Amino acid sequence: MFHLQRLPNISRFSPPGRGRGEGWVPITPSPHHPITPSPHHPITPSPHHPITPSPHLPI
């Protein structure tokens, strides 16, 4: 149980730029990281993105 509480704390304090941060970033899903699929990232297919075919687009 103690480890479970420590894991999220380490992921938050570890920046995604350091070696330790890289190890924790993929484990903790974050919408700000390109590796994690996020609707705000252009690489990830999103209905809000013009590149992705969407039924809401005029096309």
Image: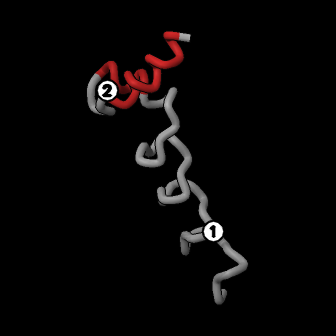
- Residue situated furthest right in the rendering: 55
Residue 7 horizontal/vertical position (percent): 46, 19
Residue 18 falls in image quadrant? top left
Q: Residue at x 56, y 47 (%)?
A: 37
Amino acid carrying label 2: it is: Ser
Sequence-earlier tag: 2 or 1: 2
Query: Quick check: 28 left or right of 12?
Result: right
For disc 1, the neighbor class at 10 Å (few under 14, some 14 to 19, many from 20) is some
Residue 45 horizontal/vertical position (percent): 60, 59
Q: Residue at x 51, y 55 (%)?
A: 43
How is the rendered protein coloured?
Answer: secondary structure
For disc 2, the neighbor class at 10 Å (few under 14, some 14 to 19, many from 20) is some
Q: CA distance from mark 2 to mark 1?
A: 32 Å
Q: Residue at x 49, y 19 (%)?
A: 5
Residue 30 horizontal/vertical position (percent): 47, 41
Q: Which residue in the structure is indicated by mark 2? A: 14
Element type at mark 1? loop
Residue 54 horizontal/vertical position (percent): 68, 74
Q: Which residue in the structure is indicated by mark 1? A: 47
